[in-house]
């Protein structure tokens, strides 16, 4: 569904000790595609999937991850200070999705949302990724909607019940 709505690459990643592990990739039928691969790992702090997960973890866990990974610059857009990262994570919590704005790879922009287990813990994330000339800053808010719907549906499959689910029957995002 997300693939057809966005016509961009969809990734599903698991969270593992401050890294994201790419375990699924679906590609559109376009000539310019992502060079990502299943089994690849990336630091969580510079990916949309990773930041979506980090935004919902306790501060102490994020502090430990920041200490371990040291927020190294991968591109000129990578967040490299704890203050900037925590400000970004706050914004992600407020809007419900994360953006990798060429932070992990120049020329690639991604939009991601966390997937929760039955306890409500963020354990994975789904994202839409594509070349920055197609996944423009203007398109981010449009792409975020199917990404958040997919994350909510996957969370529900894992038994997660958001507060909105319990009260009104709709997904939280």
Image (cartoon, grey):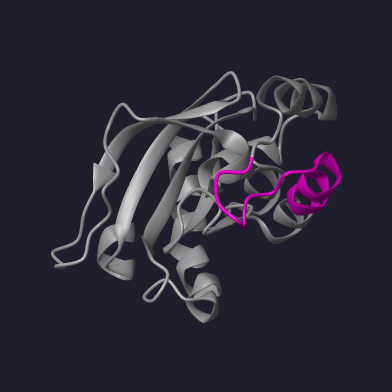
Q: Quadrant of the N terminus?
A: bottom left
Is the residue 116 above or below the residue 61 in the image?
A: below
Find out whether residue 14 is within the magenta segment. Answer: no
Q: Which residue corresponds to the image point at 72% horizontal and 44% vertical from the top-left?
A: 80
Nearest the eye: 146 or 162: 146
Find out whether residue 78 is within the magenta segment. Answer: yes
Residue 161 appears left or right of 154:
right
Residue 116 percent location from the top left of the image: 56, 33
Q: Report which quarter residue 121 is drawn in.
A: top right
Q: Which residue corresponds to the image point at 79% horizontal and 43% vertical from the top-left?
A: 81
Q: Quadrant of the C terminus?
A: bottom right
Is the residue 102 above or below the residue 17 in the image?
A: below
Q: Which residue corresponds to the image point at 52% horizontal and 43% vertical from the top-left?
A: 49
Report the number of numbered marks: 0
Residue 75 appears left or right of 1:
right
Residue 102 visible (yes or no): yes
First to last magenta residue range: 73-90
Q: Report which quarter residue 34 is drawn in.
A: bottom left
Residue 11 percent location from the top left of the image: 35, 45
Residue 133 percent location from the top left of the image: 39, 76
């Amino acid at each position: 569904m997300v693939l057809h709505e966005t016509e961009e690459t969809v990734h599903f990643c698991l969270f593992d000790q401050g890294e994201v592990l790419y375990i699924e990739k679906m590609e559109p039928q376009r000539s310019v595609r992502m060079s990502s691969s299943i089994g690849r790992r990336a630091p969580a702090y510079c990916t949309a999937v990773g930041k979506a997960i980090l935004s919902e973890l306790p501060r102490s866990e994020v502090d430990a991850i920041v200490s371990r990974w040291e927020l190294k610059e991968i591109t000129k857009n990578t967040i490299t200070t704890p203050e900037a990262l925590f400000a970004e994570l706050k914004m992600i919590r407020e809007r419900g999705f994360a953006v990798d704005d060429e932070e992990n790879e120049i020329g690639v922009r991604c939009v991601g949302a966390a997937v929760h287990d039955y306890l409500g813990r963020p354990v994975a994330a789904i994202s839409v990724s594509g070349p920055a000339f197609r996944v423009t800053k203007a398109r981010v808010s449009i792409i975020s909607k199917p990404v958040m719907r997919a994350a909510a549906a996957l969370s529900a499959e894992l038994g997660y019940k958001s507060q909105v689910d319990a009260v009104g029957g709709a997904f939280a995002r």
